[in-house]
Image (cartoon, rainbow, N blue to C red):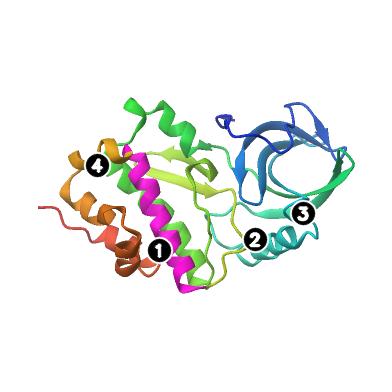
Amino acid sequence: MTAPAARKEPSLYNFAPGRVLARKYEVLSRVGASSSGELYMLSEQATGIERTAKFFSPELDPKNRCANTSAVKMHKLRHCDILVHYRTQETISVDGRDVTFLVSDFFQGETLTAFLARAPQGRLGAFEGLHLLHAMALGVEQIHRLGEAHGELAMEHIMVRRKGLRFQVKLLDLNPEFAAKRDSIRDDVYDLIHILHQALGGGKTYASLPAPVKALCCGMRRASIHERFRNAGELRLYLETMTWS
């Protein structure tokens, strides 16, 4: 297993590696945080099977509405290859408060953040980045076809593994607040292109990118990307038919 890079933002729970939760899960590492909770890698004590877990904040989700909605949404999207599969919901006590967490399958890889940290100059080349974007768009397309949006696509929640020229990609987290609205789905596409932009070096390298890549990024103007791509399927098709002069 390649351990994800530690995140620097403040932790809600500070679960140390080796701590046992719910008398059956051992903490392996912290992945990061989202607007509704915190992500960790766990191991089942009895079997050694590795899992992903999202811990929700009692302050932000006192009635478990977000946790329950997440579980239902993950179950609905269980046939989408890009998502880790939801397994079960658990509750533990932390400092006298009930904390709910969702347990999902584990994907053996590393966060995109950690992957880029090992890359030359901390970024991908243009063609390599487009291969990554295509893998992500192909996976998110399945979510959009079901009339759902992912929400909060971010590099620290994307697990990657290289296989030849291809990237295998899994998304660790989704935001249940993103309903099937036009702009939510289009915001997913913006986030995918923004991830490409970051993976290629961001603003520091943008001017030196090939013209077709800059045309795809639309200057990172959200309105322009919304107008150009209605969903991830349209982005995937665009990538497969790009012309290079």
Residue 168: % across, % down: 46, 45
Q: Nearer the viewer, residue 62 or 235?
A: 62
Residue type, label 4:
Tyr
Residue type, label 1:
Ala
Instruction: Give the residue drawn at x 64%, y 34%.
Output: 10
Residue 74's tag is 2
Q: Earlier in the sequence, mark 4 or mark 2?
A: 2
Secondary structure mostly seen in magenta is helix
Q: CA distance from mark 3 to mark 1?
A: 29 Å
SS type, badge 1: helix
Quickly name the residue at label 4.
Answer: 206
Residue type, label 3:
Thr
Task: From the viewer's perspective, tell me whether residue 187 is left or right of residue 131.
Answer: right
SS type, badge 3: strand
Label pair 4/2, CB-CB below 8 angstroms: no
Label pair 3/1, CB-CB below 8 angstroms: no
Q: Earlier in the sequence, mark 1 or mark 2?
A: 2
Quickly name the residue at label 3.
Answer: 88
Q: CA distance from mark 3 to mark 4?
A: 43 Å
Task: Work out which residue is located at the far left of the displayed protein and give it.
Answer: 245
Label pair 2/3, CB-CB below 8 angstroms: no
Q: Is disc 4 surrounded by few (<14), some (14 to 19) or many (20+) residues within 10 Å?
A: some
Task: From the viewer's perspective, tell me whether residue 65 is left or right of residue 98.
Answer: left
Task: From the viewer's perspective, tell me whether residue 4 is left or right of residue 204.
Answer: right
Residue type, label 2:
Met
